[in-house]
Amino acid sequence: MAIQGALPVEFGVVFPNGAYALGVEAITDFETKKPQTDKDNGLPLWAVDVIDADPNARGKAKSVKVKVAAEHCPTLPDEVPGLPFRPVEFEAMAVMPYVDDSGRRPRVAYSLRARGVKTPGTSGNRRSPAPPAAAKDAA
């Protein structure tokens, strides 16, 4: 079979109405209790909790996690005043199909991955936080 691994997909195909990030956390391997790493590049994996802005999305489809492989915790865009979440866009997205057999019947499920996080409409990558010196100068 010619297709192996994750399938590249554009952000707008996965989230045509946009997406909002709630937060980000490191993914820990359940058995070893160590940070989980990306099999392709060895970088630590981070899970960004996302709400799909599609008004028709319901149930499990409304809230998903997007895995981002990055050396440091991805920096999320700034909050929008008055909202508890942040508009977000993912760079270089991919979809990994797998069989979820944890329920009564096995089903095809999908894992979402990305190489970076950014503010919608920008070209800048927000994969890792600013160096400490830059943060000190901003204060």
Image: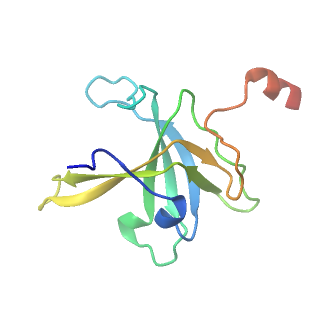
| Residue 139, visible in the rendered structure | no
Q: How many marks?
A: 0
The residue that appears at 29% across and 31% down in the rendered structure is 30
Q: Quadrant of the C terminus?
A: top right
Quadrant for residue 116, please give it: top right
Quadrant for residue 62, please give it: bottom left
The residue that appears at 25% across and 27% down in the rendered structure is 31
Q: Give the side of residue 123 with respect to residue 32, left or right.
A: right
Q: Give the side of residue 103 with respect to residue 15, left or right.
A: left
82, above or below 71, in the image: below
The residue that appears at 76% across and 59% down in the rendered structure is 81
Percent of width and height locating residue 115: 52, 41
Percent of width and height locating residue 91: 56, 49
Q: Residue furthest bottom?
A: 56
Which of these two is toward me, 1 or 72?
1
| Residue 24, visible in the rendered structure | yes
119, above or below 25, in the image: below
Q: Give the side of residue 11 with respect to residue 128, left or right.
A: left
Which of these two is toward me, 34 or 134?
134
Percent of width and height locating residue 87: 65, 58
